[in-house]
Amino acid sequence: MVVTNDYTRDEHARRYARVSRLMPEVEWDVHFDMVRAIEALKRERNAIVLAHNYQRPEIFHGVADVQGDSLQLARAAARSQADVVVMCGVYFMAETAKLLAPGKTVLLPDTAAGCSLADSITAADVRSLRVLHPGVPAVCYVNTSAAVKAECDVCCTSANALEIIESLGEREVIFVPDEYLAAWVAAHTRVRIIPWRGRCEVHERFTGAEIIEYRRSTGAYVLAHPECSPEVQQAADYVGSTSGMIAALDKARPAKAVLITECSMADNVSAAFPDTQFLRPCNLCPHMQRITLPGIRAALERLEPAIEVPAAVAPAARACVQQMFEQMRRLAA
Ligand code: 13P
Ligand code: SF4
């Protein structure tokens, strides 16, 4: 099959406008051949590239068809007409995409792209919690393995955790694995939250004292992810998911902002907020950083590594994710 490649130098220069505040054009130009090759492979394979908000700018602005938080990417995977989905994110995101789009080939360019939260809990741990708290529903953060999801009633993301938990109409709920997201939910609901002790290795590094000092010395508007500690959450002007932060920035349009989250996020959103100066406390997620343009190209060439969810857990894990969408539909009705 002959595939025409209409990714031109002009198109590359046009995309540069999105990152011109971050890098000199000569640095962007280094990526031209790789982006051009990936664009050709996307057409050849009928593939779509999904990029989490924490991805490198050359992926986020260079080759992604859909950008967003974990909830938005999961939805995009389910809705897409593509045959192949390339997940530029971490393992649990690729697994979630495969659960929602079982007929598609879901590629994760580096299968070692894990997550400290997903690794903090096993299916056996959830079973033990259920034995300790009989009859109490179990909600899991989407940052979990399919095996853990299979043991839970419904999953959620940081964008909808509070709504999903309250939608169950229960007095108490098991919520795993992020103890800080659980603390944030507990502070905003009357539902008794039974947490686990998982943490994000990136967000737990920020301290409350650091945030207070940022605000004092710069006057910046502070937005924090709920995976940060309660001290950081209390010191922030806004607490929410990565998509929530973008919406809050859009509303506040501050002169200076600091995003207390993975550091690529400020790079990626800065193009949409040209009048905001982003201060960058830099904590990178080592797992997200494993995804590179050469890795995406190789995955599309070889159609691997393709993610499969073990048949023994796939139906129950899928039901857990679909229940999240069901609860959201009910809430919207
Ligand atoms: P979001 O759900 O906000 O995309 O966050 C996912 C994540 O891994 C944050 O560290
Ligand atoms: Fe996991 Fe934290 Fe990385 Fe998000 S930033 S993928 S929660 S380790």
Image (cartoon, rainbow, N blue to C red):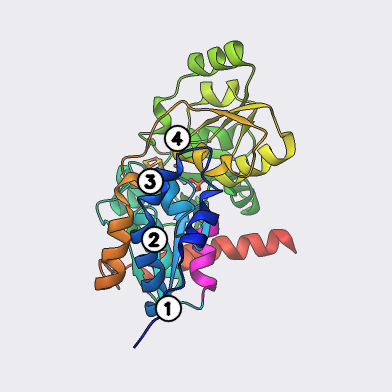
Which kind of residue does numbered mark 1 sit on? Answer: Asn
Q: Which residue is tagged 4?
A: 263
Q: How many marks?
A: 4
Which kind of residue does numbered mark 4 sit on? Answer: Cys
Residue at position x 48%, y 68% in the image: 77
Task: Measuring from the top left, give residue 122's x and y in whole percent.
Answer: 30, 50
- Mark in the foreground, 4 or 2: 2
Task: Measuring from the top left, give residue 265's x and y in whole percent.
Answer: 50, 40
Task: Measuring from the top left, give residue 187's x and y in whole percent.
Answer: 61, 31
Which kind of residue does numbered mark 3 sit on? Answer: Leu
Does residue 252 appear to the left or right of 187 in the view shown?
A: right
Of labels 4 and 3, earlier in sequence is 3
- Mark in the foreground, 3 or 2: 2
CB contact under 8 Å: marks 1 and 3 = no
Residue 35's disc is: 2
The stretch drawn in magenta includes residue 77: yes
Of labels 4 and 2, earlier in sequence is 2
Q: Which residue is tagged 1?
A: 46
Quadrant position of the N terminus in the picture: bottom left
- Mark in the foreground, 1 or 3: 1
User: Could you classify mark 3 by the number of other residues whose Cα lies within 10 Å: few (under 14), some (14-19), or many (20 or more)?
Assistant: some
CB contact under 8 Å: marks 2 and 1 = no
Q: Which residue is tagged 3?
A: 129
Asked if ligand 2 lies within 8 A of label 3, the reply is no
Asked if ligand 1 lies within 8 A of label 1, the reply is no
Q: What stretch is highlighted in magenta?
A: 71-80
